[in-house]
Image: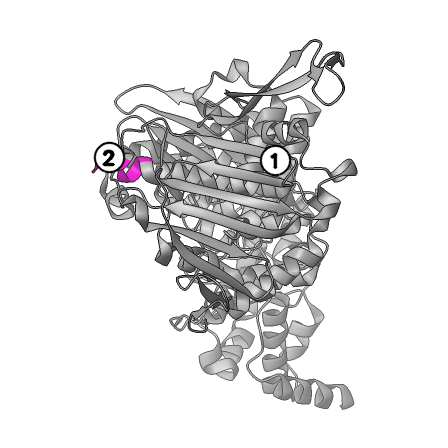
Amino acid sequence: MSEATQAEGLNPELKKHTFEAEVAQLLHLVTHSLYSNADIFVRELVSNASDACDKLRFEATNDDSLYEDDGELKIRIAVDEDAKTITFTDNGIGMNEADAIENLGTIAKSGTKAFLDKLSESQKQDGQLIGQFGVGFYSGFIVADTISVESRKAGEPADKGVRWVSDGTGSFTVEPITKDTRGTAITLHLKEEYSEGEDNYLDRSKIKRLVNKYSDHISLPIQMRKEIWQEDVVDDENDDTPTGGQMVLTDEWETINKASALWTRSSSEIDDDEYVDFYKNITYDMDAPLTWTHNRVEGRVQYTQLLYIPKKAPMDLYTREQQHGLKLYVKRVFIMDDAEQLLPMYLRFVKGVIDSADLPLNVSRELLQESRDVKSIRDGNARRILTLLASLANSEDSDKQEKFAQFYAEFGDVIKEGLGEDAGNKERIAKLLRYATSTQDGLETSFEDYKGRMKDGQKAIYYLTADNLAAAKNSPQLELFKKKGIEVILMTSRVDEWAMNFLTSFDDTPLQNIAKGAVDLGDLQDEAEKAEAEKAEETLKPVVDKLKAALGERAKDVKVSTRLVDSPACLVVGEGELSPQMIQMLQQMGQDVPASKPTLEVNPDHPLIKKLESSEQFDDLAQVIFDQALLADGGQLEDPAAYLKRVNELLMR
């Protein structure tokens, strides 16, 4: 920002400043692109006024002199039809000159660039992004050609007030003023098109409707001057002739919102539209939430929770550095946004408010991490959300089932992270998981459903991990199970194999990855099959030994398979070892992965394996069989060119 200069021909104490580049760019976009929903300026300026009062209330917990004998915090909106202005006044924390320059002339928030990029992608946004990135003040320039701000910081002398004025183009002025009361008054000088007709914001009833729509949940009183109906008003300019009744503005201020925090009211008093409007206000999400839960928790720790599950996953859901969390209040005093300590990480998509009766008002993020009360709140929130999801999943109501399906499509993979992060709720989480199977393609089968369809004598829940459903359904590992009509759960998410390390059984039934270790079908495999497998192993021993020598360090071992029917070979890793997919994922994340060699299992009945015994190209054929098994398992070839060369040479012979 350029150095301040004295405004030419004006008060010598009036200083002119140039907006920093990003603010100028932002103002251009605001004034030229966000016209599709001009109403948002009411929401944003009321929200900013509420924040200023919250900050004062928080600061005053350590120094109540900041109230200056005016402890009744409030927001007032005044309309002046003659001057064509709307003024938003609060008696909150206020600003001095340095604050005004810093807060209104520059944007220090890291989200500004992201806001500008996002807005530029689609310039006809409806303004939802404005509040999301903390630049709500500038929404006033949608409807105003000039904005003036008069403010004094709480606790500072009356002559330390400041006046900030800008037309929203390239600069602004600041000058010192005397202001007897603390707080801030923001006056919008409306553009012509917004002071008449359908878009007339000088219409008091319109402003009231917008406050009720956007800001009814704010716990502070939002006031406007009261209008009353007066009969037979005398027109002094028309010979004292009564003109009939009309609305007359009084000097009395009336509260136009409910002036109570939504979450402090009984759920029986709140309708769905109010819950939805509150969600949209705190999240800036254009969609209604999928569902929500509102409860007052009594016990050793007392708190109120209003928790929402969004309909859509945010773009930054998997950016763990991004702040996620709930709004934290203590005894209705706002403490912080994005209090991530109030939710386990795998529930980071949940939005809402926690109001604690027990936490200290000066609680910090560091103290939150160490607090036993916060741990109790976090555990309670996790249980409440998982119970809410279970009620959707287990409902016979088709609408609730559809909601759960929507939830799982957006957040199913995130929930799986809880298997490794929340041991206390592992069983609850496992009951929510849904998968495709070898007999059903949709993500509809739970572990409980699978158990209900298990064959007589089946001792384990069988599953297979793969990169996608097609790869899973065509995996050689499935061949024996298809032949015997045994259903297998198909897990196709990247998080599945990691998550299953923490879930070894469900409802006392072990889970078995069919691509790891030996296949033991127990009572599902008869004695004749076992005897035949033992015979094949003895017969093929010379070929197996030769394969071990040919593959050398590539394979941990070579064995005769009991799981293959149509394929010549497959790769198997031992129990507790990393699969090729897991190794690949960890390497892509930049992690060092310990060396792990798979076992090659060969099908003794396949013509290609039988041909090996007498083949003159044994070594090349052995390498190709191993590479093809690796590809079928979703792995990557270390040397694709060498593989192609071998295949081409074999095809030409």
Q: Would you say residue 449 is visible in this rendering?
A: no
Residue type pointed to by label 1: Asp
Q: Residues within 10 Å of mark 2 (few under 14, many from 20)?
A: few
For the residues labelled 2 and 1, the Cα–Cα distance comes to 36 Å
Q: Secondary structure at mark 1?
A: strand
Q: Is residue 71 above or below residue 503?
A: above
Q: Is residue 296 above or below residue 282?
A: above
Q: How is the image coloured?
A: one colour
Picture coordinates of residue 603 (x, y %)? 62, 65
Residue position for label 1: 80
The answer to whether residue 60 is magenta is yes
- Judging depth in this view, the residue of 392 and 636 nearest the camera is 392
Amino acid type at mark 2: Thr
Q: Is residue 354 visible?
A: yes
Image quadrant occupied by the N terminus: bottom left
Is residue 33 part of the magenta span, yes or no?
Answer: no
Q: Quadrant of the C terminus?
A: bottom right
Residue 484: percent from left, percent from top: 66, 45
- Above or below: residue 47 compared with residue 96: above
Residue 85 picture quarter? top right
Residues rendered magenta in the picture: 57-66
Q: Main secondary structure of the magenta part?
A: helix
Question: Would you name the residue on which mark 2 appears?
Answer: 61
